[in-house]
Image: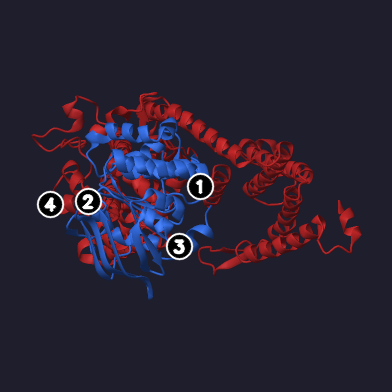
Chain colours: A blue, B red
Amino acid sequence: MTAMLRISGVRTFYGHIEALKGVDVEVAEGEIVTIIGANGAGKSTLLMTICGSPQARDGSVVFEGQEITRQPTFEIMRKGIAQAPEGRRIFPRMSVIENLKMGAITSDPKYFDEDVEKVFAIFPRLKERQAQRGGTLSGGEQQMLAIARALMSRPRLLLLDEPSLGLAPLIVKQIFQVIREINEQQKVTVLLVEQNANHALKLADRGYVMVNGRITLSGGGAELLANPEVRAAYLEGGHH
Amino acid sequence: MATLTMTGAKPVPSTMQIAIKEAFLTAFLVFMLSFLMIGFETQAQQGQPLSYVTRFAAIVWGIILVPLGRILIVFNRHGRPMPALIGGGFAFLYLFGGAVIAILFDVLVIPFNDYFGEAAGAAGIPLPFADPIVDAIFGLGALYIVILGIQTMRHTAHGELTLAQREAKEARTALRAKQISMVLGPALLVTALVLPFTPWSDRVLVETMTLILTYVMLGWGLNIVVGLAGLLDLGYVAFYAVGAYSYAKLATEFGLDFWASLPLAGAFAAFFGVVLGFPVLRLRGDYLAIVTLGFGEMIRITLINWQAFTGGPNGITGIPRMTFFGVPFDRTPEEGTQAFHTLFGLEYSTMHRILFLYYVILGLALITNFFTIRLRKLPIGRAWEALREDETACRALGINPTNTKLTAFALGAMMAGFAGSFFAVRQAFISPESFVFLESAVILAIVVLGGMGSQVGVALAAVLLIGLPEVMRELSLYRMLAFGAVMVLIMLWRPRGLLAHREPTILLRRGGGKAKPRKAGATA
């Protein structure tokens, strides 16, 4: 399989601070790939660099054979990439259905009804709440809405930034189940950034460990889960 | 009340101590604010040097009354509404009631003074201020204290609201606003349509209504920029000016009539919207507001100084008047041509043109309204609203923020351009003086007070803010004071505007989960 997304030697700066110090990551079509790491390791920065905000100073991001490193964010997001951003960032004053409509803003309106049915099948909860304002949803529902909104643009690659953040364990489990469903049934490739290493690695085909803006380890999900270093740093001390 | 002060040793100041401290501060503030502005009145009389009279009594009364009110507010804030209710109530009844009686007395009895003799000269109620209007305003201040007291009473009766209750309350307010809008909107429209033919209608009323409708249209236009796209524009009057000067120049130089210039004026204004928008749309919030403010002033100062093109401070005179689609409203048409009254076989009347102008602005305003309502339901309208909520999220959804904002700016400016050419054709004379910052501020106030994004609210606010000062012209300078008071009161009562509610742009078939465009909104 050739890589759908290839990130090579990417360096990103916030002012003078080097947040990514030469990162190489590859995602093949159909995979679920996860990037785990501690707070401030640069995981979210990497996702945002893929989206071009901020842009990488060095290195390149290639999506489906096309260089997207220097393109403006809105152009990148029209190429079949969608993101459920960190902190969900749904539109709080708009209703659930309007949020979904916003997600579909770049795609052909004739698919809208069909796609809404699809995401409602994945998240029946959202169907019940469709007329409710986004801001009145619970945290878990907002996360579902963020993912559903991302799916409405019919992406081939879905970027998820910490979907488990601040959610109850039961909801986290549901969210991860849904991510697998999306990957298997909708044939969407997933790049997932997580602090919840246990769940993320169980779900993922492959994983990368990120420390201080660098990839320090990579391998299959199960393989990393068994790795003593990973266990010591991200599993035994933290979640469980 | 002062029992707490007896315990002494505690470092926490008692309510009385706080009240006295704040009262002194307030007294100081009143003195500083009023000493020069109220204490001296300059008088200019023909042939005599400028002199002044002092009004120290008014200041003394201010220094007594305002701190007393402050004390009541402090007690109320500390959970004791009784003094506010009693003291405020008494002050309101005495000051406001006394003022009303005094004014009525003036209006009703003074004309008969000669008949009744000196005894009828004053109502006989001793009021602190010489001018009953000022007494009335102080009375309204007291009424506000009473309202604060009632609110405290209610709160102590029901306890603090939980978040859910507050949500529910907000939802109820929004629902009520929606219901009011649904009744009020058509009612206002029907009123506007038939008003010129009612018996009360006269020239002044129709002209005032024309003025109000101009501001309704400007408000609706600015609502696209501020209410929907959330871009705070303090220089909106610049586009109004561009529209006005466009028509004036096109008509005087190229002989185009109103209907031919209208689209051109709109296009010019939209172009200026883009020109302004392009460099500034990276800015957000306050910074954007400052730059738009500057842009408004730039246009005005250019108009003043570009003598050759704009006529400078003298403006442009002799702008051709409105025609009935090419047929003039003249009393004596040129040989071989028709005038409006000969065409329809009517008696000549100056009201024809005034009425026609009225219906033209009504039509233009309604088009703006219809246009805005449609836009909201199109992807671009939704993108504006989303952009207002979260720009980063929008970019992540593939929306180009610059283009989206520019469209809002251009469309809003276009509406101002239309309104501007209407202004020019109505006045037949324009000068930079009509396009000062205060105009931008008034239009913005209409949008904000009306409830951002609410069409009916904007219309209502325009009636209030433009109509009231016209009605209150007799109050001369106090009307600006009343204008300010109305604004403050609305913001206290309804912090989100008179009729703030947000209608969803798409509704769903029940249970079906299928998106159904509202009134075929998404098909266009």
Residue toward you, B289 or B138: B289
Q: Residue at x 37, y 33 (%)?
A: A120
Q: Quadrant of residue B363?
A: top left
Determine whether B183 is above or below A22 in the image. above
Tag in front: 4 or 3: 3
Tag count: 4
Q: Which residue is mark 3?
A: A228
Q: Which residue is mark 2?
A: A79
Q: Taking the image as drawn, is residue B434 in sight?
A: no
Q: Quadrant of residue B15?
A: bottom right
Labels 2 and 1: the sequence-earlier one: 2
Q: Are marks 3 and 1 on the same chain?
A: yes
Q: Amino acid at mark 4?
A: Phe
Tag in front: 3 or 1: 3
* Label number found at residue B254: 4
- Real-space CA distance between mark 2 and mark 3, rounded to the nearest whole angstrom: 39 Å
- Real-space CA distance between mark 4 and mark 3, rounded to the nearest whole angstrom: 85 Å
Dot 2: what SS? loop
Q: Amino acid at mark 1?
A: Leu
Dot 1: what SS? loop
Name the chain under label 3: A
Q: Are marks 2 and 1 on the same chain?
A: yes
Name the chain under label 4: B
Q: Residue at x 46, y 32 (%)?
A: B178
Q: Are marks 2 and 4 on the same chain?
A: no
